[in-house]
Image: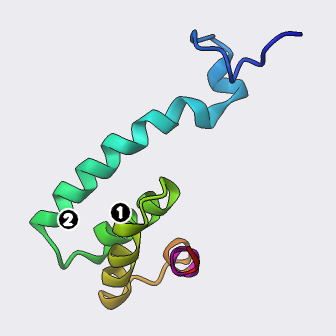
Amino acid sequence: MGRSLCEEPARSPYRAWLCPNAEKTWLKHPALEVLKTAFQANVTNGDIAAEIGRLALELDHLEIAKPALEVAEQQGVHDWKTLSAEPAANLL
Protein backbone atom coordinates (compact mmCIF):
# COMPACT_ATOMS: atom_id res chain seq x y z
CA MET A 1 0.00 0.00 0.00
CA GLY A 2 1.33 3.50 0.74
CA ARG A 3 4.62 4.35 2.37
CA SER A 4 4.71 6.25 5.63
CA LEU A 5 5.77 9.87 5.62
CA CYS A 6 8.87 8.91 7.62
CA GLU A 7 10.11 6.82 4.68
CA GLU A 8 9.39 9.37 1.96
CA PRO A 9 12.54 10.91 0.52
CA ALA A 10 10.80 14.16 -0.30
CA ARG A 11 10.21 16.52 2.58
CA SER A 12 6.60 16.76 3.51
CA PRO A 13 5.26 19.65 5.59
CA TYR A 14 3.87 17.03 7.97
CA ARG A 15 7.06 14.98 8.23
CA ALA A 16 8.55 17.01 11.08
CA TRP A 17 5.36 16.64 13.07
CA LEU A 18 4.91 12.91 12.44
CA CYS A 19 8.61 11.97 12.65
CA PRO A 20 10.35 14.55 14.83
CA ASN A 21 13.59 12.56 15.12
CA ALA A 22 13.93 12.05 11.36
CA GLU A 23 14.35 15.77 10.77
CA LYS A 24 17.02 16.24 13.44
CA THR A 25 19.14 13.12 12.96
CA TRP A 26 21.22 14.64 10.18
CA LEU A 27 22.17 17.52 12.50
CA LYS A 28 23.78 15.27 15.09
CA HIS A 29 26.89 14.31 13.10
CA PRO A 30 28.00 17.92 12.50
CA ALA A 31 27.17 18.69 16.15
CA LEU A 32 29.51 15.92 17.24
CA GLU A 33 32.29 17.39 15.13
CA VAL A 34 31.76 20.84 16.66
CA LEU A 35 31.80 19.39 20.17
CA LYS A 36 34.99 17.45 19.44
CA THR A 37 36.67 20.64 18.25
CA ALA A 38 35.51 22.51 21.36
CA PHE A 39 36.75 19.70 23.59
CA GLN A 40 40.18 19.69 21.93
CA ALA A 41 40.48 23.35 22.86
CA ASN A 42 39.56 22.64 26.50
CA VAL A 43 40.18 19.02 27.46
CA THR A 44 39.35 19.57 31.13
CA ASN A 45 35.78 20.75 30.50
CA GLY A 46 33.57 18.04 31.94
CA ASP A 47 30.36 19.50 30.55
CA ILE A 48 31.61 19.34 26.97
CA ALA A 49 32.94 15.83 27.58
CA ALA A 50 29.53 14.75 28.88
CA GLU A 51 27.77 16.16 25.83
CA ILE A 52 30.23 14.46 23.48
CA GLY A 53 29.87 11.18 25.34
CA ARG A 54 26.09 11.16 25.23
CA LEU A 55 25.90 12.22 21.59
CA ALA A 56 28.60 9.79 20.49
CA LEU A 57 26.82 6.98 22.31
CA GLU A 58 23.58 7.88 20.56
CA LEU A 59 25.37 7.81 17.20
CA ASP A 60 27.15 4.51 18.03
CA HIS A 61 30.63 6.03 18.19
CA LEU A 62 31.78 4.03 21.20
CA GLU A 63 35.46 4.82 20.64
CA ILE A 64 34.57 8.46 21.37
CA ALA A 65 31.82 7.92 23.96
CA LYS A 66 33.72 5.84 26.51
CA PRO A 67 36.73 8.16 27.01
CA ALA A 68 34.55 11.27 26.93
CA LEU A 69 32.22 9.92 29.61
CA GLU A 70 35.23 8.94 31.72
CA VAL A 71 36.58 12.50 31.51
CA ALA A 72 33.16 13.86 32.44
CA GLU A 73 33.06 11.60 35.49
CA GLN A 74 36.59 12.63 36.52
CA GLN A 75 35.63 16.30 36.22
CA GLY A 76 32.64 15.81 38.51
CA VAL A 77 29.74 15.85 36.06
CA HIS A 78 27.03 13.83 37.76
CA ASP A 79 23.78 14.79 36.04
CA TRP A 80 21.25 12.03 35.40
CA LYS A 81 21.82 11.94 31.63
CA THR A 82 25.53 11.35 31.99
CA LEU A 83 25.10 8.85 34.81
CA SER A 84 22.61 6.85 32.75
CA ALA A 85 24.87 6.90 29.66
CA GLU A 86 27.93 5.49 31.43
CA PRO A 87 26.58 1.94 31.97
CA ALA A 88 25.31 1.81 28.39
CA ALA A 89 28.77 2.73 27.07
CA ASN A 90 30.38 0.04 29.23
CA LEU A 91 27.96 -2.66 28.09
CA LEU A 92 28.61 -2.21 24.40
- Mark 2 element type: helix
Q: Is 21 placed above or below 76 here?
A: above
Q: Verify whether residue 87 appears in magenta.
A: yes
Image disc number at residue 52 = 1
Kind of residue sitting beneath label 2: Phe
Report the residue at 84% width, 10% height from top: 2
Determine whether, in the image, residue 17 is placed left or right of residue 2.
Answer: left
Q: Earlier in the sequence, mark 2 or mark 1?
A: 2
Image disc number at residue 15 = none
Residues at badges 2 and 1 in contact (C-beta under 8 Å)? yes
Determine whether, in the image, residue 45 is placed left or right of residue 28.
Answer: left
How far, Cα to Cα, is label 2 from label 1? Answer: 8 Å
Report the residue at 78% width, 15% height from top: 3
Q: Position of residue 43 (x, y in %)?
A: 16, 74
Image disc number at residue 39 = 2
- Mark 1 element type: helix
The 10 Å Cα crowd at callout 2, few under 14, some 14 to 19, many 20 or more, is some
Residue 71 location, quadrant: bottom left
Kind of residue sitting beneath label 1: Ile
The magenta segment: 84-90
Report the residue at 43% width, 67% height from top: 62
